[in-house]
Image (cartoon, rainbow, N blue to C red):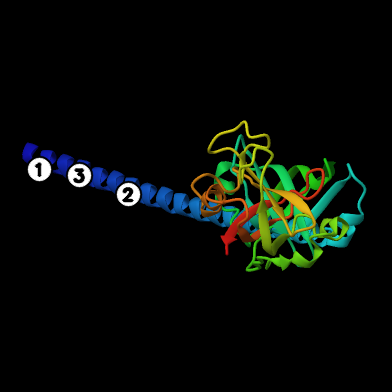
C-alpha cells in the first residue's frame, strides 16, 4: 500500500512537472512569437520611416534643383547675394581643413567655387562630371567672380557632364572677350614662351622666391599681347605632367595650352596641359 501511494505521488508529481514544462514551453513560444511580431512591426515601421524620409529628401532636392539659377541669372545676380546653382564638377584643388575648391560648369558657362565646405569622404567623390547643387555667396576677388562660403549636396541620377575646351586663340588680344569666358575650360594654340623678368622660362611663385612644389608662373605671347599663366600647385602639383612640362620649357618654345580661365587682375589662367611643338 505504501508503495502504491508512493507511486501515485511520483506520478502526480511527474504529471505536474510535465504540465509546468508544457506551460513553460507554451509561454516561451508565445513570448517568441510576440518578440517576432514586435521585431517585424519595428522593421516595418523603420522601413516606412526610411521610405518617408527618402521621399521627403527627394522632394526637397527636386524643389531645390527647380529653384537653382540659370547661368544667365547667376551672372546677373548682384555681388554678395546668395546664389544656388546646379553644376557639374570639372576639377578640384586639394581638400584641406574640411573645405575644397571646385572648378565647375554647366552647358552655359563655368563657375569657380572657393573653399566649399566638404568632408574628406565627400571630396573623394567630387570627380569630373559629378552633379552637385551648390549654395553660397557670389563674390569677387581681384576681378575673379566666384562662389564663396558655399555648401553643397550631391544630386542623385545619371547626369554627367564634362565640358569640352573652348578655343580662345582668336580672342587672345581681346581681354573683354576673354573675360566673358571666365572660369571656362579653354585651349589656346601657337603661343610663344616669353622670358620672365630674370630671363628664365618660368618662376617658382609669382616673384621667383619659391621652390619646387610651389605654383609655377610663366609668360606667353602671340607676338602682340603677353599674359602670365599659372600652374596652380593645389590643382596640378609637382608630380603632374603639366608641372614637369613647364619646368622643362625654354624661352622661345612654341606651345599649345589647356586650362581654366581664372582671373587675377586680368587674365591669369590655371593651366592643366602644355604641349611643346
**Residue in front for this viewpoint, 130 or 257:** 257
Q: Residue at x 55, y 45 (%)?
A: 237
Graded by Cα atoms within 10 Å as few (under 14), some (14 to 19) or many (20 or more), the crowding at tag 2 reads: few
What secondary structure is marked by label 1?
Answer: helix
Graded by Cα atoms within 10 Å as few (under 14), some (14 to 19) or many (20 or more), the crowding at tag 1 reads: few
Expressed as whole percent of the image width and height from the top left, the position of residue 246 reads 57, 50
Q: How far apart, in angstroms, are the residues tagged by discs 2 and 1?
A: 31 Å
Name the residue beneath numbered marker 3.
14
Q: How far apart, in angstroms, are the residues tagged by discs 3 and 1?
A: 15 Å
- Which of pointers 2 and 1 indicates the residue nearer the eye? 2
CB under 8 Å between callouts 2 and 3? no
Name the residue beneath numbered marker 1.
4
Mark sitting earlier along the chain (2/1): 1
Expressed as whole percent of the image width and height from the top left, the position of residue 181 reads 80, 60
Decide if residue 168 is on the left or right side of residue 33: right
Q: Residue at x 28, y 46 (%)?
A: 21
Q: How far apart, in angstroms, are the residues tagged by discs 2 and 3?
A: 16 Å
The tag on residue 209 is none
**Residue in front for this viewpoint, 8 or 137:** 137
Amino acid at each position: 500500500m505504501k508503495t502504491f501511494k508512493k507511486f501515485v505521488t511520483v506520478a502526480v508529481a511527474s504529471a505536474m512537472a510535465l504540465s509546468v514544462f508544457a506551460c513553460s514551453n507554451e509561454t516561451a513560444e508565445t513570448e517568441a512569437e510576440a518578440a517576432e511580431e514586435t521585431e517585424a512591426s519595428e522593421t516595418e515601421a523603420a522601413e516606412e520611416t526610411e521610405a518617408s524620409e527618402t521621399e521627403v529628401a527627394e522632394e526637397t532636392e527636386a524643389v531645390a534643383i527647380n529653384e537653382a539659377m540659370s547661368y544667365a541669372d547667376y551672372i546677373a545676380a548682384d555681388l554678395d547675394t546668395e546664389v544656388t546653382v546646379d553644376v557639374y564638377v570639372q576639377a578640384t584643388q586639394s581638400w584641406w581643413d574640411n573645405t575644397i575648391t571646385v572648378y565647375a560648369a554647366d552647358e552655359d558657362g563655368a563657375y569657380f567655387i572657393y573653399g566649399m565646405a566638404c568632408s574628406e569622404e565627400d571630396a573623394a567623390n567630387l570627380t569630373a562630371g559629378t552633379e552637385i547643387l551648390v549654395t553660397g555667396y557670389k563674390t569677387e576677388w581681384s576681378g575673379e567672380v566666384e562662389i564663396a562660403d558655399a555648401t553643397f549636396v550631391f544630386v542623385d541620377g545619371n547626369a554627367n557632364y564634362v565640358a569640352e575646351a573652348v578655343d580662345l586663340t582668336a580672342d587672345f588680344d581681346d581681354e573683354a572677350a576673354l573675360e566673358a569666358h571666365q572660369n571656362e575650360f579653354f585651349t589656346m594654340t601657337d603661343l610663344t614662351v616669353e622670358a620672365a623678368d630674370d630671363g628664365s622660362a618660368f618662376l617658382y611663385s609669382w616673384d621667383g622666391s619659391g621652390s619646387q612644389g610651389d605654383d609655377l608662373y610663366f609668360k606667353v605671347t602671340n607676338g602682340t599681347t603677353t599674359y602670365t599663366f599659372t600652374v596652380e600647385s593645389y590643382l596640378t602639383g609637382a608630380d603632374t605632367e603639366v608641372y614637369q612640362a613647364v619646368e622643362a620649357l625654354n624661352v622661345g618654345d612654341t606651345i599649345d595650352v589647356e586650362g581654366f580661365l581664372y582671373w587675377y587682375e586680368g587674365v591669369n589662367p590655371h593651366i592643366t596641359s602644355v604641349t611643346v611643338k
